[in-house]
Image (cartoon, grey):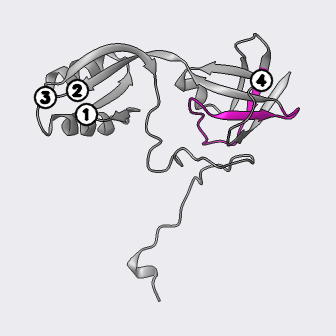
Amino acid sequence: MLTLHTRIDGPAPVDGELVLPFHLREKSRLRAALKSGEEVAVLRPRGTVLRGGDLLQGEDGRVVRVVAELEAVYRVAHGQENGLLRCAFHLGNRHTQTEVGQGWLRIRADAVLREMLLGLGAQVTEERAAFEPEAGAYGGGHHHGESHPLAPVPLRQKIHRPSDLP
């Protein structure tokens, strides 16, 4: 079985495609199958997320492109100036993974959240789309230029308080 463990920066000849929904692209340990049917193991440090278009290299040198699978999502828009900001606030308050676009938000399909958004005056449209939510303040973002195994996001960071200063 091919083991994929290193994210690389392209361009590189691609030997296969790995199609995954977002909830599987968040996992650090995963057994999956390439589009060709070949089984692979994905082994990455905790806290890393695969994005559509990422290139992974296996121990044998082969390169696999990650493809974001189309998922059931809602596209959220709002006609009022601050309406979309209010929607984003309420989604964030519920720790909802959210993709942010120019004048729209995208979330996983969820009937309860849909009703909340409609109550805020939003237009909610069902779609099947690649879901690429924001990484969050401590998510590390999407890095390019890496040709080595990814480092995990630190679980704790030192908080400096004024009383800590000499």
Q: Amino acid at mark 2?
A: Ala
How crowded is the residue under tag 3: few (<14 C-alpha within 10 Å), some, or many (20+)? few
As helix, strand or loop, the secondary structure at mark 4 comes to: loop
Residue at mark 4: 15
For the residues bearing labels 2 and 3, Cβ distance under 8 angstroms: yes
Q: Is residue 126 magenta-colored? A: no
- Count of numbered labels shown in the rendering: 4
Q: Amino acid at mark 1?
A: Gly
User: Which residue is pictured at 72% across the width and 16% down the height?
Assistant: 34
Compared with 141, 14 (above or below) is above
Tell me if 140 is positioned left or right of 3 in this view: left
Label 1 vs label 3: CA separation?
A: 10 Å
Q: Position of residue 73 (x, y in %)?
A: 39, 18
Q: Amino acid at mark 4?
A: Asp
User: Which residue is pictured at 49% across the width and 16% down the height?
Assistant: 70
Give, as a single range, the part of the protein colored magenta: 40-61
Q: Position of residue 49 (x, y in %)?
A: 58, 37
* Between discs 2 and 4, the one toward the N terminus: 4
Quadrant including the N terminus: top right
For the residues bearing labels 2 and 4, Cβ distance under 8 angstroms: no
Label 3 vs label 4: CA separation?
A: 45 Å
Q: Residue furthest left?
A: 80
Quarter location, residue 114? top left
Tell me the number on the disc at residue 2. none
Q: Nearer the viewer, mark 2 or mark 4?
A: 4
Residue at mark 3: 79
Residue at mark 1: 103
Tell me the number on the disc at residue 77. 2
Label 2 vs label 1: CA separation?
A: 7 Å
How crowded is the residue under tag 2: few (<14 C-alpha within 10 Å), some, or many (20+)? many
Q: Residue furthest bottom?
A: 166
Quarter location, residue 105? top left
